[in-house]
Amino acid sequence: MRNHMSLKPFELRTIVDGDGKATDEYRRFYARVERGFHEKPGTPEVQDYVAGLYQDAGFVHRGFVETEDAPEWAGESSQPVATIVGFPRRMEVGEKAVGLWAISEVGVSSSHRRRGLLRTMMTNELTEAQRDGYGLAGLTVSEGGIYGRFGFGVATRVGTYELDLRRRPRILPGVMESTGAASGRVVEADPQRMLDLAEDICAQSDAGRAGKINRLRGHIRNFLGQTSLDKDSLDPVRGREAFVYVGHSGPEGYMTLDHEGMDSDPWKAKIIDVQAVTPAAWVGLWNHLFSVDLLELVEFKDAPGLALSSILENPRAVTANREADLIWTRILDVVSVLESRRYPHDGDIVLLVDDPMGLVTGAYAMHIEQGTATVTPSSDVSGTQDRGDRARDDVALAPNAPRVRFPVDRLATAVFRGCEIETRLGVVVGDGAEEAAQIFAVNREPYCDFEF
């Protein structure tokens, strides 16, 4: 077994050299990442391009390297054996957005497991993000049983659907008029020329939709087909189609798709992206898709809940194929997060937040009036003292308010998805559990279309 002393932590903030090329350290980092996720590392040209995007976006690469000399047949020494990446984003909570420290590329070499490397990296990442003022941390996961211990809970889910145009779907009578979709028009567009427009529409469509995370510019380019990063290429995607919905105020939404070609049987397309600032744009884009020639089946992703099916005369034209969690969040600032969403039920309640990492453990009084929360933490929440993993009640804090005890991962879920099931089945407990279920109830499924 290797000596723990041979492991050395590292941090990379500069990953592009003076010639605009990815540094050797960056390439070694992603060689480790790609081995861990069983993917190809990408061509040097793609690595150079992506490194530039990441440096501009403020990515921080951290981990551990093995410094002990290895046999020649084992490859170079000083190779990363554990990796983690963090970068700044904003995440919509419902009323407003909060700072999100997005975490990705988390992995530990199979030869260096059970040494506490994952816990060390995650603790450092979350502690520093909290110190820097981020209200949330977020990630996507390949294994669902790992990150609850670090306080992450499911915030958004995504569904994969199939639309069967052979059933001749039609929008319900009146919907085109009631949403205003009928007063707009849909224009064919060139996705190679609409980056600025797409960025503007994405920013507007994100506002107020709980779960949305602002995309990187490079991701928007890739959705438009200006690059083909999923195919390890900087070449544009040939044949990507785009439609833009134009309303009274100008462009209000767009849709991009790839058609599999005339040789496919049945004729099939995949929706790559749909962004809509208004209900009119969303309805209008789908209504236009129904009229596209030589198209029979369409695969697309959306929030769970079959929204498209709900506005069709024949709801069976849409089939739900799969649903999965997407974004997991971790609360780093209880006050700012709770004060950034709206609530359907006014009242007073005290949350006792248990945090296995001790970052936000404590009692928090919520006073909700006209849907807006004011959150007051107990006196022992401030300061740098060890908070432990179980919250102590503060009887002087809103003494007449009911109490409810939340594991921090379940509070992260409740903020975005509510907690009716958790209170009914005893995951969230206390005399205020029923009150909490009412307070945190949501009327619209949170959604994120940015996977990282």
Image (spheres, rainbow, N blue to C red):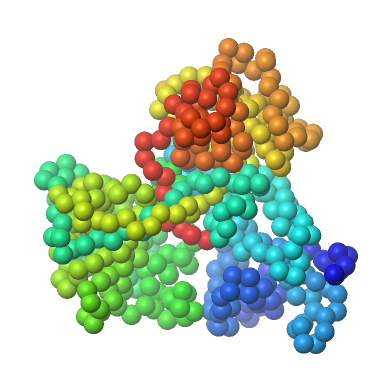
Front-most of residues 323 and 329:
323
Front-most of residues 139 and 118:
118
Q: Residue furthest top?
A: 400
Q: Residue 211: x and y, percent?
A: 45, 47
What residue is rendered at 45% in x and 78% in y?
Answer: 231
Can see residue 173? Answer: yes
What residue is rendered at 57% in x and 58% in y?
Answer: 143
Q: Residue 391: x and y, percent?
A: 69, 29
Q: Left or right: 162 with respect to 144? A: left
Q: Left or right: 446 with respect to 281? A: right
Q: Residue 348: x and y, percent?
A: 52, 19
Q: Above or below — where is 29 with respect to 423? A: below
Could you say which quadrant of the image residue 242 lies in?
bottom left
Q: Residue 389: x and y, percent?
A: 72, 36
Q: Residue furthest front?
A: 425
What residue is rendered at 75% in x and 33% in y?
Answer: 387
Count the labels in the image: 0
Q: Left or right: 182 with respect to 143? A: left
Q: Quadrant of the N terminus?
A: bottom right
Q: Above or below — where is 158 with respect to 330? A: below
Q: Above or below — where is 427 with respect to 281? A: above
Can see residue 372? Answer: no
Could you say which quadrant of the image residue 392 lies in?
top right
Q: Above or below — where is 355 with respect to 41? A: above
Q: Residue furthest left?
A: 173
Q: Residue furthest bottom?
A: 72
Could you say which quadrant of the image residue 197 lies in?
bottom left
What residue is rendered at 56% in x and 36% in y?
Answer: 411
